[in-house]
Amino acid sequence: MVSEELKVINPSGLHLRPAGNLCKEALKYDSKINIIFKDATANAKSVLSVLAACVKCGDAIKITCDGRDEKEALEALKNLINSGFGELK
Amino acid sequence: MKIYGVGAAEGIGIGVAKVVREQNVEVVKKTVSDSETEVNNFMRVLDITKAETEKMSQALEKNASAKEAEILFGHIMLMSDPMLVDEIVNRIKGESVCAEYVIEEVCNQYAAVFASMDDELMQQRATDMIDIKTRLIKKVLGIENTDLSKLPYGSILVAKDLTPSMTAGLNPDNVLGIVTQFGGKTSHSAILARALEIPAVVGLSNLPEDISDDTDILLDGESGEVIILPTDNEKSDYENKKKKYDANKEVLKKYRELPSISKDGKKVEIAGNIGSPEDAKKVIENGGEGIGLFRTEFLFMDRDCMPTEEEQFESYKEVAAAMEGKPVIIRTLDIGGDKEIPYMGIVQDENPFLGYRAIRLCLDRKDDIYIPQLRALLRASAFGNIKIMLPLITSMDEIREAKALISNIKKELDEKNIAYNKNIEVGIMVETAAASLLADIFAKEVDFFSIGTNDLIQYTMSVDRGNVKIAGLYSPFSPAVLRSINRIITEGKKAGIMVGMCGEAAADPLLIPVLLAWGMDEFSMSASSILKSRQIISGCDSKDLKAKVDKVLEMSTESEIKEYLKKLTEEIGC
């Protein structure tokens, strides 16, 4: 399993569109992917689960990936989050 | 029968009613013998629903309604959610119960979670969840509302209100009008109608409950008039109105490619007012020659933290680049105690419009608010023709202090070798009595004036325009307001600077000839008014008009001026 702490920098936080894009990306990988925020664990492949975590701009989250493509998955999600989901362009 | 509502999307609609009836859906828990078939049925319904939503979402994106497309995108994401879908499938299999019952249970459970969240945007997701639930259950049970995707040509959609999912299958080619009992100018139905250019009247509180399908209906999306079961006379009236409206639309299209020049050859600029970068597209589509007012408040609203300099830079740059060298006047933050913004520490002010706001607040919060915004503006100026506009100016000190900040930032950018437009223009909103009285002095210190009529009227007439008891005082035709505008234009032109206007009055057909004759250079307005205003200007002879419009400066009442200008514009036929 690999994991990394990241800061959410896009203005709207993990609201519908960013959360949706995060899930779309996560669904491309076989690994089990979780988002850990404030003691709660969200399934990165479920938009409902990610939304329910209520992650806002400036919050620090931990991403964990577990599976055969875990490294690639983590890298992809990291890039997406650090790019601000295109909200910053 | 005539009734009146809120005109939500322009145009004349003539057609027959297609009523969307809200059926109460009774969900009964039933056991099923073949849960495999039940699951397959559910998956099939889910796929159809997703495909319909996808189609509508694309149609809306094309029609520049990102916000509506966003809601539908959300619906698709929610319907694709493995957690939701798996839970429904597993429960149908595990409990051998019917799909509609499980959908009801599971969706309600998620809606309740969202509704309990302490976040307005999340609470809206509860509405989405319920909307999806109802739609899926109806589809499973084979209850069809009027199927909006199959409405025949000539339909006028009649409903209590339209939800995003109801409209997902709507065919805009066949629907000639929308009439709803609820909603206002910014409700889903209204936004959708404008995006699809379907005439619409909403908020018809006395819309009869018992309209039957195929009843004749006429509607005027501008005035908000709806006629049910019209007489032959009314019908032919509306047919004429529609012909006129359509012809007018065609004529206006012609003006899209033309410059804004009066009969006597005076060239002016007609620009658009925008509230976010995506609005710039509408301005370009309507033949706008620039952006006369870009309100930057949107960057600071509806969020939990200050926008970074980078984020602001990207937004300003996006507009500057989209306008391809045409002027883009960006107003620095105009915010105050009429809005509560917790992360900025802005609290309700007792007298917000006379209080701590706009330039006053910004100059007091240089480090965290003003310097980052000005730096973002300067950096973005390398990508287009950006001009900086300072709001709510009342004293020379404010202008000088802001300009000093700008020149300090320029020095800093020079040192770091960061590109920006060294000759960037800095102008002011002229919207206070003080600025109007000092226009001659301010004109020597700034590069342009833009008259903000909404506030100028409010501050000149001491009238709160939101207060209906005194709304009669709020008028651009007040003699005091027109004298003030005349003074601002005259002093600006004397000093040789550009004078524009970015309030509603700039698009008023009665005022355009006046402003033109007085020498105003730039008219900035909402995108939808641009072509109409260009047509008016093309029909005016500014030299010939000068003596005629100057007469209003000698008139003593608002009604006298308005009457006079009505006659004058009829005479010149514009």
Image (tube, coloured by chain):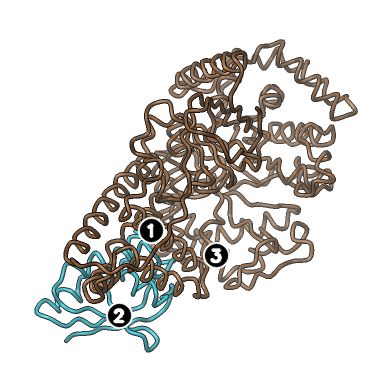
Chain colours: A cyan, B brown
- Name the residue carrying label 2: A35
Looking at the image, the residue that sits furthest to the right is B556
Locate the C terminus of chain B by quadrant: top right
User: Which chain does the numbered disc 1 sit on?
Assistant: B
Amino acid under disc 3: Ile
User: In this image, B462 relative to B423: left or right?
Assistant: right
User: Which chain does the numbered disc 2 sit on?
Assistant: A
Residue at 15% from the left image edge and 71% from the top image edge: A29
Residue B229, disc:
none
User: In this image, B475 relative to B311: left or right?
Assistant: right
Amino acid under disc 2: Ile
Establish if B157 lies above or below B413: above
**Residue sitting nearer the eye, B194 or B446:** B194
- Name the residue carrying label 1: B132
User: Which chain does the numbered disc 3 sit on?
Assistant: B
Q: Are marks 1 and 2 on the same chain?
A: no
Amino acid under disc 1: Ile
Residue at 59% from the left image edge and 57% from the top image edge: B333
Q: Residue B110 location in percent, x, y?
A: 40, 72
Measure the C-alpha gap from mark 1 to mark 2.
Answer: 26 Å
Q: Residue B481 location in percent, x, y?
A: 80, 36
**Residue sitting nearer the eye, B314 or B412:** B314
Foreground label between 1 and 2: 1
Badge 2 element: strand
- Name the residue carrying label 3: B371
